[in-house]
Image (tube, rainbow, N blue to C red):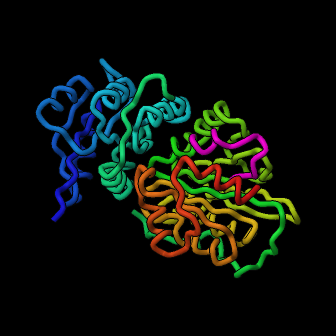
Amino acid sequence: MRKPVRVLIVDDSALVRKTLSGILGSDPEIEVVGTAQDPYIAAQKLRSVVPDVITLDIEMPRMDGLTFLKKLMSQHPIPVVVCSSLAATGAETTMRAFEYGAVEVIQKPRLGTRQFLEESRIRICDAVKAAARARLKRYTPGLEVAPKLTADAVLPPPRTRAMAETTEKVVVIGASTGGTEALREVAQALPADSPGIVVVQHMPEHFTAAFARRLDGLCRVHVKEATDGDPVLRGQVLIAPGNRHTLLKRSGARYYVEVRDGPLVCRHRPSVDVLFRSAARYAGPNAVGVLMTGMGDDGARGMAELKETGATTIAQDEATCVVFGMPKEAIDLGVVDRVVPLGGIAREVLALAG
């Protein structure tokens, strides 16, 4: 039997520490080995017990969680799941947490925290277990429970090869755990005239806008959070907004996105399966689908539908994934044309989509 994932909870709220302890302790694959109300106490506990994963708040007295995370990942990396009440005003700070090495971010509200955490039980436990398997890099300063629905809940299945192939290609990308930094590397490698790209990265509401702004400042392509009706243009990357599904649509020769509400699909909103299904339906052989690092299986079935309608499919390889979950599921289904390391994905996309 596999040993349980050992977790240290760091949060200044006694209620959150108690609630998280109960949630994580209810999973037989997780063991809470301690709690701490601030990073100084956490550092003391780390001298006697080394957990597999740390859950970390950002806003804390004496030392904020971001400073602690930076010190931890530069000296003794341990997988960290940030559980923060920061919303839109703190989104830039949380993006910095990803840069410093946080594996996942769970956004908690400032009010009703206990109810929210209870309702997010499955997601929190899954995030901790995925973090325990994550491949970590040492941070170097100066370097920057609902039913598990399918995409049927949002969009009917595509017709096989319903779309004629044209010279204009569109790229759809899905990523989850570890995807923020992986997407940054891909986007920075793209030229200013790269094909139009639509991305689903599993992130909380409000955080996707900050993520898009960060990438836009680093890349030659223009990066923005998608809004309903945005055209898919060469030299532009659209990031699906948190808590909204984003679909690819087509009007004549023009591609655009539809941003809509809907149920969780594969426990996610936005869902990669929904984006990929829409690309299969409206682009077919004109699409290139890319599935990158992430926990779970969101995107695997959608990639099968892309493959069935004539699209070319790419998966990130195991060696460069933080969590080899989503790409592995698609590879195991036999629907991936090319398995590519992270550093080669941009080059492969350009070769296939012009």
Pick whichever, 78 or 39, lies toward us: 78
* Image location (x, y in percent) of residue 105: 43, 43
Q: In which quarter of the image is the N terminus?
A: bottom left
Is 317 situated left or right of 261 in this image?
left
Question: Would you say residue 186 sits in the magenta stretch?
Answer: yes
Question: Is the residue 54 above or below the residue 25 in the image?
Answer: above
The structure residue drawn at horizontal position 45% and vertical position 72%, both measured from the top left corner, is 332
Residue 59 visible in rendering: no
Would residue 323 be visible to someone looking at this image?
yes
Identify the residue at image location x=79%, y=75%.
Answer: 163
Where residue 66 appears, as percent x and y from the top left, is 39, 27
**Viewer-proximal residue among 31 and 197:** 197
Residue most toward the bottom?
160
Residue 4 spot, x, y in % from top left: 19, 55
Residue segment shown in magenta? 185-197
Closer to the camera in the image, 250 or 294: 294
**Residue 100 falls left or right of residue 3:** right
* Residue 160 painted magenta: no
Q: Horizontal and vertical percent for residue 114? A: 33, 45
Residue at 43%, 23% in the rendered image: 141
Left or right of 207 on screen, residue 131: left
